[in-house]
Image (cartoon, grey):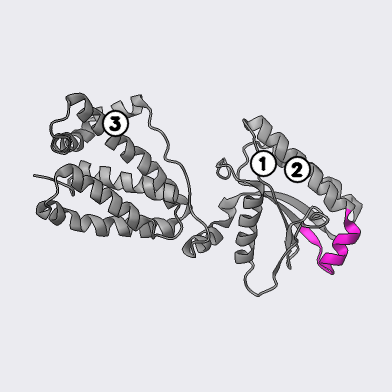
Amino acid sequence: MPGNPQPWKGNDWENHCQRLLKKRYASPPGSYQHIPSTTQGDYGLEGYAADGTGYQCYAAQEWADSKQLYEKQRNKITRDIGTFIANEKELVKILGAIKISLWNFVVPYWNNKDLLEHAKKKETAVRPLKLKHVGRDFRIAILTEEDFATEVQLLAHLNLYQFDVAAPPVAAADLASWMADKGKLELVANLSRKAALIGAGKSEEKKRKFEARMVAHYISGNTVLGRLQQEQPETYGRVIEYKVSRENNLEAETYSTNKVPAQFLEATLQQYRSELTDVPGISPRVAESLAHEAVSDWLLRCPMDFD
């Protein structure tokens, strides 16, 4: 479905959208104009470009299911298009000779095609009014952050935006299936051997829990990595560079360390997590997930070995 259902506070989403739009229309300067809503509202338009494209941003709050989300977004379009129509005189003063031909409704996420149908009904209702600030072929479109991939990456590079997703939980059945997969037998054997060294003196039950936790970190961390690669490929590339660079030194470090395996494991995790926090464009939560993914990967594949 379009977008990311991660919740946003209304003002945070609007501020984020304004940063994206100012990047999109950065050249030439003045191609985009933000319309503040601090005094008399935004007249159903939070910004517009010189090419006649208008933007209205909205992050629905406290929705529990698809039906609630659709209703909130549908009602918001209805209200804002009503405001956009009613404030013809005021908008003509703001827009001057520019006519809005495309009204973009920018949301974090939407998942009901009926919203498109509602948008089409509203745009066909606007056209016959022949408003002075509206183009003859007026259209309404629904956008998400996915439509601003280039701008998101630019903001991430400047650390003005951070990729932030929670590592998904791994179901017990999926975990058991992964560990029982014949193609993973060598990886599981590597982990089991090293778990015995890391948890020397611990019970067999604690050893099994440690192994399960490492595999869960690996699976969920790979999901986060996949999302990062899809949404921010340049940031993903920098993360992989960090990982490869750290991995290249691990074999020598595990051979020469004076730390016991458990201490070395924890020190490696903490150091790599700290390094990831220096990568622009990822949140501390993502840095945590990716650090755990890397450590579990190194244990499974043997760049981190204690023999």
Residue 173, how many percent across, how many down?
A: 34, 24
Q: Is residue 259 left or right of residue 116?
A: left
Mark 2 or mark 3, whichever is nearer to me: 2
Look at the numbered discs 1 and 3 and tell me whether their residues touch, using CB distance below 8 Å.
no
Q: x, y percentage for residue 243?
A: 29, 55
Q: Tell me whether the residue at label 2 lies in contact with that at label 1, contact meaning CB atoms closer than 8 angstroms.
A: yes
Left/right placement of residue 152 relative to residue 301 reads: right
Q: Residue furthest bottom?
A: 28
Residue 38: quarter of image: bottom right
- Magenta stretch holds residue 96: yes
Of the residues under marks 2 and 3, which one precedes in the sequence? 2
Residue at image mark 2: 76
Question: Residue under circle 3?
Answer: 178
| Distance (Cα) linking label 2 and label 3 | 45 Å
Considering only vertical position in the picture, is 76 above or below 271? Answer: above
Whether residue 296 is visible, yes or no, is: yes
Determine which of the numbered discs, if any, sits on residue 60 in the image: 1
Q: Can residue 123 be spotted in the picture?
A: no
In magenta stretch: residue 137: no
Residue 135: image quadrant is: bottom right
Q: Which residues are magenta?
A: 87-101
The secondary element bearing badge 2 is classed as helix
Tell me the CA gap for discs 1 and 3. 37 Å
Above or below, 176 relative to 162: above
Residue type marked 1: Ala
Residue type pointed to by label 3: Trp
- The amino acid type of the residue labelled 2 equals Lys
Q: Nearer the viewer, residue 19 or 67?
A: 19
Query: Going by the image, does 138 lie left or right of 275?
Result: right
x then y, percent, for residue 145? 58, 52
Q: Nearer the viewer, mark 1 or mark 3?
A: 1
